[in-house]
Image (spheres, helix red, strand yellow):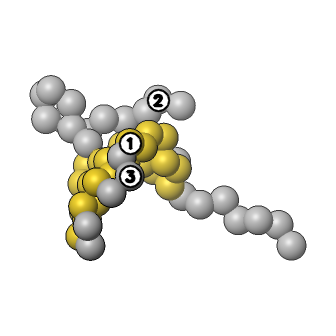
Amino acid sequence: MSKKEGRFERIYSQGVSDVIEIWVDKETGVNYIYRQSGYSGGMTVLLDSLGKPVINKE
């Protein structure tokens, strides 16, 4: 049985109890920022200085 590849890939992580991560949607290239603190967390689209989504060209 082959291992199924996930759609999202974590490309950056920092912190232990307060975590910040950047995830990339491998199908669209759109970057998301994830923030976790304690028992709560959230994810949103990562924006550039013009307010447009950051998109990997790869």
Q: Residues within 10 Å of mark 2 (few under 14, many from 20)?
A: few
Q: Residue at x 26, y 49 (%)?
A: 45
Q: CA distance from mark 1 to mark 2?
A: 24 Å
Q: In the rendered structure, which disc, 2 or 3, sits on the residue that comes first in sequence?
A: 3
Percent across and percent down for residue 42 are: 24, 62
The dot on residue 33 is none
Residue hosting label 2? 57
Could you tell whether 12 is left or right of 20 in the image?
right
Locate residue 22: give its quadrant.
Answer: top left
The answer to whether 38 appears left or right of 57 in the picture is left
Labelled pair 2, 3 in contact (Cβ < 8 Å): no
In the rendered image, the quadrant that contains the N terminus is bottom right
- Which residue sits furthest front? 17
> What type is the residue that disc 3 sits on?
Val
Report which residue position mark 3 lands on: 16
Q: Position of residue 29 (x, y in %)?
A: 44, 41
Q: Residue furthest left?
A: 50
Disc 1 on helix, strand or loop? strand
Instruction: Residue 15: give x, y in percent of width and height.
Output: 36, 46
Query: Looking at numbered disc 1 in the image, what kind of residue is underneath it?
Result: Gln
Would residue 24 be seen by someone viewing this image from the given angle?
Answer: no
Q: Disc 2 marks which amino acid?
A: Lys
Q: Nearer the viewer, residue 51 or 36?
A: 36
Q: Nearer the viewer, residue 18 or 11?
A: 18
Kindly identify the residue that appears in the image at 33 percent across and 52 percent down.
Answer: 19
Spatial CA span between label 1 and label 3: 7 Å
Q: Which residue corresponds to mark 1?
A: 14
**Label 3 neighbourhood size at 10 Å, few (<14), some (14-19), many (20+)?**
few
Badge 3 marks a residue whose secondary structure is loop
Residue 7 image point, x, y percent: 54, 58
